[in-house]
Image (cartoon, rainbow, N blue to C red):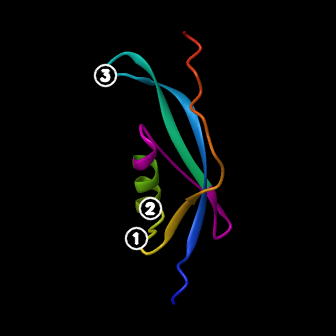
Amino acid sequence: METKEIICLDVKTVPAFDIETHMPHTAYTVSCMLNGVFAIASGWVLRDAIELFRQLYCINENVAIRLTRPFRPQKSQNH
């Protein structure tokens, strides 16, 4: 069997603000060291952040993405 390359991404949730709805929101940031360079991408949903990461750093679909640690969305401080 062929061994599939794996990239491990650290996931963080960050408070954000949606300027269209004027509401607080949570965004997702994924990052890792990639060939000696700190690589990072973010999105409103985790799937979008991972897809943007693939596009920005030319990671093809044959490379597996693994999340390095469990994460919990941060609670809004407004509640």
Q: Amino acid at mark 3?
A: Glu
Name the N-terminal-most of marks 3 and 2: 3
| Residue positioned most to the bottom | 1
The reply to whether dot 2 and dot 1 touch (C-beta < 8 Å) is: yes
According to the picture, the residue beneath numbered tag 2 turns out to be: 54
Q: CA distance from mark 1 to mark 3?
A: 32 Å
Residue type indicated by callout 2: Arg
Q: CA distance from mark 3 to mark 2?
A: 26 Å
Which residue bears the numbered disc 3? 20
Residue 56 spot, x, y in % from top left:
44, 59
Q: Which residue is mark 1?
A: 61
Q: Which residues are magenta?
A: 32-47
Residue 38 visible in the current orientation: no
Q: Residue 15: horizontal and vertical position, in percent?
A: 54, 26
* Eye-nearest disc, 2 or 1: 1
Residue nearest the viewer, comparing 45 with 31: 45
In the rendered image, residue 67 lying in the magenta stretch gets the answer no
CA distance separating discs 2 and 1? 8 Å
Q: Residue at x 46, y 45 (%)?
A: 46
**Residue 52 drawn above or below residue 75:** below
Residue located at (62% from left, 40% from top)? 71
Q: Is residue 46 magenta?
A: yes
